[in-house]
Amino acid sequence: MTGFCYRNGVLHGEAVDLRMIAGELGTPFYCYSSELIGERFAAFTDAFADMNPLVCFAAKANSNQAVLATFAGLGAGADIVSGGELARALTAGIPAHKILYSGVGKTAVEISAALEAGIGCFNVESEPELLALSSIAAARNVRAPVSFRINPDIDAHTHAKISTGKYEDKFGIPIGDARRLYAEAARLPGIDVVGVDAHIGSQITCLEPFDSLAVKLAELAGDLIRDGHALRHLDFGGGLGVSYLPGEPPAPTPEQYAAVVRRRIRHLSLKPVFEIGRFFVGPAGVLVTKVLYIKKGRNRTFVIVDAAMNDLIRPTLYDAYHHIQPVEKVATEMPAEVVDVVGPVCETGDFLALQRSLPPLRPGDLLAVMTAGAYGAVQAGTYNSRPLVPEVMIRGEAFAVIRPRPSYEDMILLDRLPPWLQPS
Ligand code: LLP
């Protein structure tokens, strides 16, 4: 059994009782199913198999070493957006030639490190970045493999904070400037034009934006090939959505997505490339938290839990819905109650769910916040001096702590006293 399912009324990650992990590690913690990650990766790669794709994992979705090493073992590449992600991907064993580097603000130090490692492609997001890359590569006497990230001005119909393919967004170069910039790139020292790239947003739940993107990229690639560029790949970015509500139909399936891509690029002999984050890891993770108190307000009931916005910021930042379910199903005659599930952080925006119907809960009950494997732990912080939330990975009957909970001492030791405050 992969993923998270009830067995005898108790939520398990694969074959592991989540109560057992809570007993050993305490709460809150993130927990990932490595088998489900593998299944989701296989479902995607199988759907595109006839197109011989390069499937990369967008490391930003979950960059724990154990998660990246799992992807390395599956044969995935990595989409990275910083020197830190480069170091993490290489350390986890992702081959450099399968690493793509996106992002609008690559520094000279980061560019040098990526050239040194010999990454597969720089997804260049502006003309000044192209010039910087050219001069750094030429000075090192190497050639940087380059795609431009195209901004196709397509509405991905997703939350405004995670839409990236409109002209109002800071990402990529306007599609109308592409041929001029590719011509310039071809003339510059230290640059090898190898592909075309785009990423129009995240949590995309309909096919139409992907289809519009495929049409525009295929047309542009055709023009660029006619202009004499030796393109090798077409990178569609990430964005494939997942269902956050149980029973909700899955967002476009990999097969549906593959059919769109196949139809639009079949006349071009280009390798499709993907930078998938959420689809691979979102459903493969949960955040487990414990009920501390039930507080009856005048017109609200607050279920106060030990996880907070610093551990999972998605509900307050993107109005995101995460399904919440008790780890132990309790047979009860009592009706469900509509409650706010909130954390201990001193902010009104600190909630995991508002006005949510949940079965009656008591202090000490464990809750699982579902579909939290993507953009959960990676966006966690230590606000209110709450130690960074730990992470656990399950495989079959085994589980391992893949990031321990820091002690207060660990946390404090990150700071330094200036000489004038040190005890003499
Ligand atoms: N490629 C690039 C260049 C990206 O910027 C992203 C995500 C991806 C690929 C992967 O997209 P995915 O397949 O995961 O949709 N923190 C937000 C999501 C931000 C996504 C940023 N870029 C959230 O929690 O919803």
Image: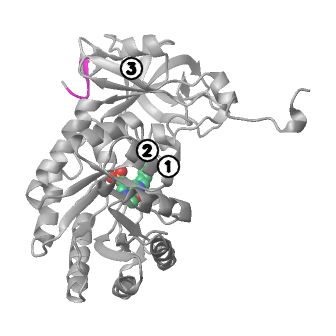
Give me the residue at 67% from left, 23% from top: 409
Q: Tell me residue 140's x, y (percent).
A: 47, 69
Tag on residue 84? 1
**Which quadrant holds the C terminus?**
top right
Helix, strand, or loop for circle 2?
helix
Question: Mark 3 or mark 2: which comes first in sequence?
Answer: 2
Disc 2 residue type (three-letter): Arg
Amino acid type, callout 1: Gly
Whether label 1 touches label 2, CB < 8 Å: yes
Check disc 2 and report the residue beneath it: 88
Residue 359 is labelled as 3
Q: Is residue 416 left or right of residue 285?
A: right
Looking at the image, in which quadrant does ligand 1 appear? Answer: bottom left
Which is in the foreground here, disc 3 or disc 2? 2
Q: Residues within 10 Å of mark 3 (few under 14, many from 20)?
A: some
Q: Report how far apart the C-alphas of labels 1 and 2 lie in the structure.
A: 6 Å
